[in-house]
Amino acid sequence: NTSSTKIEESMIELEELAKAAGGNVLGSIIQNRDNYDVAYYLGKGKAEEIKEYANNMQANLIVFNEELSGAQIRNLEEIIGLDVIDRTALILDIFAKRALSREGKLQVELAQYKYRLPRLIGVGKEMSRLGGGIGTKGPGEKKLETDKRHIRERIYDIQRELKEIKKNREIQRSKRLKSNLPIVALVGYTNSGKSTLLNKLIQSHKEYSSDKDVFVKDMLFATLDVSLRKAILPSNKEYLITDTVGFVSDLPHYLVEAFKATLEEVSYADLLLHVVDSSNEHFNLQIDTTLGVLKEIGAADKPMIYVFNKADKVNYELDYKPKDEYVFISAKTGYNNEQLLQKIESHINSNLKKVKLLIP
Ligand code: GDP
């Protein structure tokens, strides 16, 4: 039955996300919808069952696969006696660790505050016990208001800075078009190794470059540009490289909005490097998810190289032949780095030729 397959796939993804966040997954429970109770998200009996299960497993955190309200989290924590988070909080945590650019970081922070604001209820667990919640002025009330005000102020500041960055980016974009440097965007499922590869590719900039001015030029570039880094090919040809966050399935709607701007860069890219964690047994699901996101932002038809990463962890031939070009690398050990650079170079060259043909 398709709906139960969908739930299973979604649970597999949740486990992968928990691992990506540095967690050690001890087990999972699926809830029967008939026993649903609004106050607990699941039936009270189920919550008790989870408590026992978690105790046996010696777990110290419970992750729910759907979005929970503040009251639900508090009630569940009270029964289970452990910290409870939901899928969105988990995703936000991963993105917070992964975002590289100032803009990406701000977007994650903004999403975190927007997530937290409606979930602030009382200070710890006192409020509900003291006044039963509604209409009563518990001792936590004042602090709660101050917290909320601080968050709203911070949200306002972040939004202003993001607007500034966006304006700047449009200016940069026109400069960039003039500079004519090709743009390469790293896309791919969370935890596939994009940041690791980005750092590697930027490093080759330093290795290959003999230009003494390069550092100064880079500094200038760094202050102007928020999301693009300069990298260089063995032939000394320069290109720009950009990072992205947001490749997870079933991303809550307001997170999609939050990451649109980072993803927007992808639609200006000349070439996509689709990074895949080949050591993950569900890598084809992850490829589909990434392709789905690319389709949503209208970037599905861009030239693409599949970069099957973490080759150092895989000792078998992958049963996956993409129609586009592909290469097996290890961003960690540097295995096949040269081959990847050559592929990037030949793509960039053939694209530039096309551009020249278009200009009479
Ligand atoms: P991102 O979420 O796509 O940016 O992924 P990261 O670059 O943060 O990498 C996720 C995890 O995979 C990190 O723990 C990396 O150290 C690890 N990793 C990245 N590339 C490789 C690789 O080639 N081999 C191995 N074994 N681990 C890697």
Image (tube, rainbow, N blue to C red):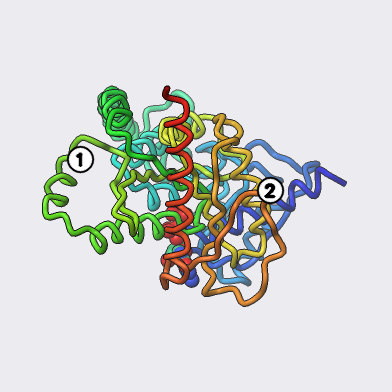
Residue 18 image offset from top left, x and y in percent = 54, 58
Mark 1 close to ligand 1, CB under 8 Å: no
Judged from the image, the quadrant occupied by ligand 1 is bottom left
Tell me the quarter of the picture where residue 197 sits. bottom left
In the rendered structure, find residue 44 and report the number of the disc placed on it: 2
Residue in view at x 38 percent, y 43 percent: 242
Q: Nearer the viewer, residue 339 or 225?
A: 339
Disc 1 marks which residue?
A: 221
User: Percent position (x, y) of residue 285?
Assistant: 67, 52
Mark 2 lies within 8 Å of ligand 1 (Cβ measured): no
Horizontal relation, residue 272 to residue 278: left or right? left
Residue 238 at what x, y percent from top left? 30, 47
SS of the residue under disc 2: helix
Determine the image quadrant of residue 53. Answer: bottom right
Discs 2/1, front: 1
Residue flagged by tag 1: what amino acid is it? Phe
The foreground one among 50 and 274 is 274
Q: Is residue 67 left or right of residue 197?
A: right
Q: Is residue 77 visible?
A: no
